[in-house]
Image: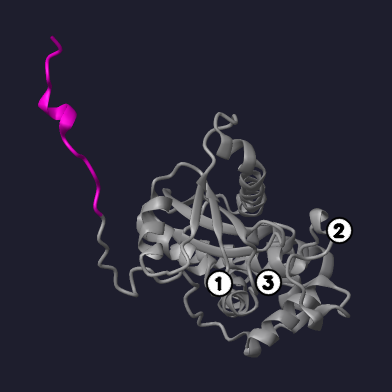
Amino acid sequence: MQKLVPTHFKLNYQYREYHLTPNQIEHSKPLKSRVNLFKIYNSDNVLGLILTFYVSFAMSARKTALILRMVFNIHISGQTVLNYAQAAACYCHSFNLKHKGSIDDICSGDETYIKVLGKHHYVWFFISSDKRSIIAYHIADNRGAVPAITTMKEAIRTAYPDQKITLITDGNPSYPAGLHYINDKRENKIKHIKVIGLENLDEDSLEYRAYKQVIERLNRTFKQHIRPSAGFNAFNGAVSLTTLFVTYYNFLRPHMTLKYKTPIHIPDIDDIQTIQAKWIKIISMAA
């Protein structure tokens, strides 16, 4: 006779109830800078060159200052490069949010780590599958549900009311926990697909692996752009460079998959030939 174990008949379930304030799920953004870009001693062209070398070409602040001095005879310090970049990030953040545009039905997300004051922080990204545009970015000191909620809320902010959205992520439990909070307030529920590991061991992984690889390639590109910084000495510095990277990736960087067009088209910069002038135009549009 088989022995009955009471725990075999015990019902187990999880119940989540969130009590989050708007401040707790606020998008990370650069702090307002003391530098007024419209009253700096250098010309707009110098500012554009700084953003070109520091962000577009992924140079460190010191190497950017060295190039400007040795190639263009422009004498500025590495700290000035950082000051100008952080001031520009404030404008670029509002530009990124305003010109994000619509999103695709399938979007993929992931988080990658960075170092701030020697400690791990995490950059959360979501990217649109076909347009290849970054539709959300957020920096936090943990991989929990709250930063996942913050990032996913921004990712779906510009979706159509009746749009059926599918989010592709890895196995991080923060994503389904965050979607529980978001779907609780939506009539049109968001579908979530997990792609786990490196091999296609289930049907979902086999069908949606390509979408997960898109976000993985974005993470590698991002890491290449922040590697010269060798970590950050302040949280605001990490937020600023990430913001500028998103501006470059979405509006200025030609994408091979898109036949060397940018993920988001800005007609106002079509006739501008140099990338430094395009940076200045974007900042002027955001001001």
Residue 199 image position (x, y, % from top left): 59, 29
Residue hosting label 1: 162
Q: What residue type is labelled 1?
A: Asp
Q: In the rendered structure, are the residues bearing label 2 and label 1 in contact, judged by CB atoms less than 8 Å apart?
A: no
Mark 2 is surrounded, within 10 Å at the Cα level, by few (under 14), some (14 to 19) or many (20 or more) other residues, namely few
- Say which residue appears at 46% left-offset and 41% top-offset: 171
Left or right relative to 56: residue 127: left
- Principal secondary structure, stretch drawn in magenta: loop
**Placement of 173 over or under 74, stated as above or below:** above
For this rendering, which residue is in front, 234 or 218?
A: 218
Left or right relative to 13: residue 77: right
Residue 269 image position (x, y, % from top left): 81, 79
Residue hosting label 2: 259
Count of labels in the image: 3
Q: What residue type is labelled 2?
A: Lys
- Say which residue appears at 63% left-offset and 40% top-offset: 207
**Placement of 233 over or under 28, stated as above or below:** above
Q: Is residue 41 visible?
A: no
Q: What's the mark number on residue 76?
A: 3
Q: Is residue 206 visible?
A: yes
